[in-house]
Image (cartoon, rainbow, N blue to C red):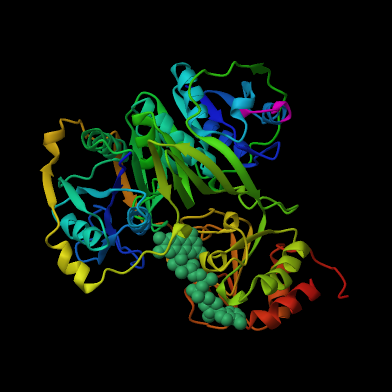
Amino acid sequence: MTILVLADHHDGMLAGTVSRVVTAAREIGGTIDILVAGHDCGAIAAAAAEIAGVNRVFCADDPRYEHGPAERIADLLVSLAPGYDVLMAPASSAAKAIMPRVAAMLDVMQVSEIVAVRGPDRFDRRIYAGNAILTVEAQDSCKVLTVRASAFADAGRGAAAPIEPIAPIEGPALSSFVSLEASRSDRPDLATARVVVSGGRALRSKESFAELILPLADRLEAAVGASRAAVDASFVGNDVQVGQTGRIVAPDLYIACGISGAIQHLAGMKDSRVIVAINTDAQAPIMRLADFALVADIFEALPELTRKL
Amino acid sequence: MSLKIIVPVKRVVEASVRIRLRSDGGGPDIANAKMAMNPFDEIALEEAVRLREQGLADEVLAVSIGPQAAQETLRTALALGADRAVLVETGAAIEPLAIARILAAIVAEEGAHLVLMGKLSIDEDNNQTGPMLAGLLGWGQANCASNIALSQNTARVTCETDAGLETRDVPLPAVITADLRLNEPRYPSLPNIMKAKKKPLETRPLDAFGIDTSPRLRRMEIREPPERQAGLVVESVDDLIARLREADLIPSGRAVQ
Ligand SMILES: Cc1cc2nc3c(=O)[nH]c(=O)nc-3n(C[C@H](O)[C@H](O)[C@H](O)COP(=O)(O)OP(=O)(O)OC[C@H]3O[C@@H](n4cnc5c(N)ncnc54)[C@H](O)[C@@H]3O)c2cc1C
């Protein structure tokens, strides 16, 4: 098998999820190449080359790939596809726009967000907000896959693979970048963090979210997450929504504060190794799921927890 | 330019229903489940109707590909403001790639310049039909929209991404997929439900399209995910900290300050 992994990156940094996709690629088995498309992305390509098990890294470094235009990157992938049996990428927001476009252009049915590799063309994925596991066998000769990174371990580092520049593809831009309202933080990335502290509607305001959740996250060197209700109420940015329609996480420790545990929220975090829930309602669904459930008011429990850690 | 918007809508198990699997391994038991329009499609439809109400679009066509019962979903779409509806009737489960092909054929027939659709359907969680359709048509696309400003021939779309909110200009024709925060869909009013009964709803057999819809993915098995073991109710914050230290989940030994 020949496998091409599309790298995800932000702010000049390779996403931690890429190494996990390489792990999935190694389970499929074969030669693994990585494609980095961006502008001034040499350092990203260098980081990708150090992932264990990578054969070579293609670097498409060109202004037209800045800010990841899905249409152009899809064209680039389609041009490389004839050399590969498998095209895969982490199921990031970027790949969710690019990979199905590629699949359709190649007349291939994508397998979305695989959580296990059961054979070279057999994969598990979750359906119905995580409430069922579906095993599918891909019949197309070229396979297009996105990978739920939280379900695979980091591949580790190896000897640096060679990096080869590749020329951009001509063609229309179709859409153009205007602006990015980035939520910057020095915290670990939600997708690969070992600890996640999440807040829900019970936080009541942006201010109390900042006062109660952030210091605890700082103490635990954790990523910050949120329920949809908390994001809808603008306590935090959209990029930290955990759930069926947000980010999928599976950290060693997930602390849900004032979150009820709706099906759609559970879909994003129930594969966490240990779940802690703090809620005034002992009957809330998340309390039944939690490994450690603390019936308490977060306005008292969170400051105490942060202070005592 | 007159603008026609196509909004694909799917009939799915209602979002709050926790599905059960059939004991014969045949997948989710939806025979008696409450069904509804996929919530993301509802948001896409609301956006399309608002664009028409603002005079920025001329016609909103709702399309569903599915069983006869999806007529009900289309009637809801008409009650919510769609002008016309088309059901492409099939009893078979059709994969996103084939759905995208059927939609591409309808887009061509109708001469539509904008497709507004949900970013995913909450049953199969594939997240792929929108970009597939854009790829087949060779159109520009914007995924997971939380805001759309339409002017002349361009849509300025704010997209929810892993890095934050990204705004892009997409010239029409285009496919835009809707995320949760794009708008809050209205409820159908009684007069509009009555009016919807008189709006045109055309049913067409899938065969009429001459598109190969045979599945590319073989469904081998559907099973329940492993149950989590029942947890423990901890008595206090101190108790919680002790348990987490015991499990080596948080650094131990830091003195109380
Ligand atoms: C199509 C669709 C997609 C969705 N996608 C997502 C998604 O991706 N992610 C997501 O999270 N949701 C999603 N939702 C929304 C989901 O259904 C819930 O509405 C949402 O998760 C609720 O958020 P919450 O738990 O913060 O709020 P609530 O359900 O209101 O829960 C608040 C909780 O806080 C507790 N509480 C209140 N006060 C205190 C206090 N002082 N101390 C401690 N506890 C307190 C309450 O007992 C309650 O359990 C989606 C819904 C739909 C229809």
What residue do we see at 61% from left, 76% from top? A204
Quarter location, residue A253: bottom right
Up-down relation of residue A283 to residue A263 (above or below): below
Which quadrant is the N terminus of chain B positioned in? top left
Residue B75, image x and y in percent?
Answer: 19, 60
Q: Is residue A42 magenta?
A: yes
Q: Is residue B227 visible?
A: no
Magenta region: which residues?
A37-43
Q: Position of residue A158 (x, y in %)?
A: 71, 28
Q: Position of residue A190 (x, y in %)?
A: 63, 53
Residue B37 forms part of the magenta stretch: no
Which sits in the foreground, B231 or A83?
A83
Image quarter hosting the C terminus of chain B: bottom right
As drawn, is B82 to the left or to the right of A179?
left
Left or right of B256 on screen, residue A239: left
In the rendered view, would you say A23 is above or below A292?
A: above
Residue at 27% over, 68% down: B188
Classify residue A221 by image quadrant: bottom right
Q: Position of residue A84 (x, y in %)?
A: 47, 20
| Residue drawn at the location 64% of the way across and 50% of the way down | A181
